Image (cartoon, grey):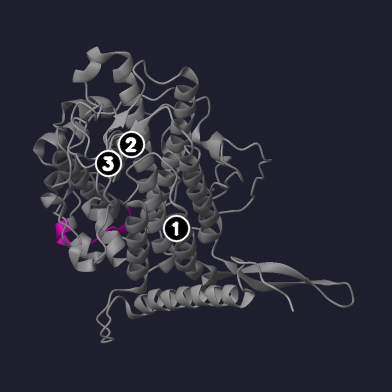
Amino acid sequence: MQVRNQGEENPEQMESAEDKRLLAEMEMMKEKFAKLLLGEDMSGGGKGVSSALALSNAITNLAASVFGEQSKLEPMSPERKARWKREIGWLLSVTDYIVEFVPSQQKQKDGSSMEVMTTQQRRDLLMNIPALRKLDAMLVDTLDNFKGQHEFWYASKNASDSEKGVQRDDVKWWLPTIKVPPNGLSEETRQFILKQKESVNQVQKASMAINAQILSDMDIPESYIESLPKNGKSSLGESIYKNITDDVFDPHQFLSTMDLSSEHKVLDLKNRIEASVVIWKRKLHYKDSKASWGLALSSEKRELFEERAETILLLLKHQFPGLPQSSLEITKIQYNKDVGLSSLESYSRVLETLGNTVLSRIEDVLYADKMARDPSLAAEPPSHQAVESLPLPSKLNAYPNPEENNSDKLDSSAETPTSSMTLSDFMGWNLEPPEGDVAHASPPVQAEPVNSNAKEEEENVVTTASKSTSTFKKYLYIDKIDLSGLKSPIARH
């Protein structure tokens, strides 16, 4: 008879525990997909939101519950990390079944070839889902890199004011304050943190670029178009319209004359300019015959003004990345019916949010180090103050009116160390222009993060084709601006 050692686990007990875990996960997965199918209407009355919006809400809610606890620059707990990996995989599995027909060669028994149509994952998903998963892994790995870091630490909530160290001069009073050695961080640790910061900065820019491209691919809802004024001048106002339509136009000079002292004012300017761009585009491309869209400008001038307005929007996007979604963006997400686009938009948005959160935590440590080395700078605010709430609420009826937004005010950002690589170099993207106007080139992503010595593999895939109904040529967001020399962004969310 075999005698079992005390403390040795019974295989039957282990199997039972594993079975219970799998059953619990299966029940959780059933609940999540039931909510998606019901459109969040648990009464089953068919009054729920669209599948696309339900999936977007599910990804947003998951990210809020998992990453909302990331108040320190430290690795995620194994439980939270496992939950994020498991549940985001469930939600993104929907995109595996969004397919399109593509031609392929099939060999016959006699050795001849015949072209047949087969299905593959839709090209925009085939390209961007692996890219976003790689950015996701890089952000989680960056947090893991701070494991065992002892040169800075966080004061406890019950510590006295004298023990708390550097006090944050902003409204994020609930975040723990950081303490560093009296003479600051060692040079080795400081360079390590700067390297992590640059890596996160690049990931944040990539997420922002993908999110902006996906939003541009979404159709503009009729409800938004019907709410627009008669012309671009009415949308912009007399003063702004005069500046944009002047013979000599400098976008940087234009922004320097605008009152951008608060988030509300910046968002209002963005809403006005986006509305004017939509108006001008409709007059140029759709030749709308409605009286309210009457032709008051020549096509050449209208196209010039549209380009100027889009340039201003790009500058605002990168100067104030902490802004909530504009009225146009909120309306697009709210009324979008494409489940694939909804998945890409929400996933890229929450990754951008996590990147901003990690970037904010890194900036806080660097600020504490700066104060320790030069206490005379204590009057200066931290260079990176994040707005760290997710950009969209989870329910359809909770979409905010941008005019009533009460989010934290934005502060000016400080410059980061100059990167030796551009975003395109970092991600391994092929930005050669496409042939014709049907498709745009999209980025394949390197296989490993920057701090890995493993061999990087390039993926050669094409991205989404423009919709046949679209009259505008699609373009990559990063084609419009050089991202290598930008200031470190204030966290967008």
Q: Where's residue 447, x and y in %? A: 61, 46
Is residue 288 shown in magenta?
yes
Q: Amino acid at mark 2?
A: Ser
Give SS at disc 3. loop
Instruction: Give the answer, above or below, for where 396 lies relative to 474.
Output: below
Q: Residues within 10 Å of mark 1 (few under 14, many from 20)?
A: few
- Residue 200 at what x, y percent from top left? 44, 37
- Among the two numbered marks 2 and 1 on one chain, the one whose residue lies closer to the N terminus: 1
The kind of residue on which mark 1 rests is: Glu
Read off the residue under disc 1. Answer: 79
Residue name at image x 19 percent, y 67 percent:
397
Badge 3: few (under 14), some or many (20 or more) residues near its Cα, within 10 Å? many
The stretch in magenta equals 285-292
Q: Quadrant of residue 1?
A: bottom right
How far is mark 1 from mark 3, CA to CA?
A: 29 Å
**Circle nearer the N terminus (2, 3):** 3
Query: Residue under circle 3?
Result: 322
Q: Which of the two marks, 2 or 1, is nearer to us in this view? A: 1
Residue 360 tag number? 2
Q: State left or right for residue 107 relative to residue 71.
A: right
Residue 40, percent across and down?
A: 29, 75
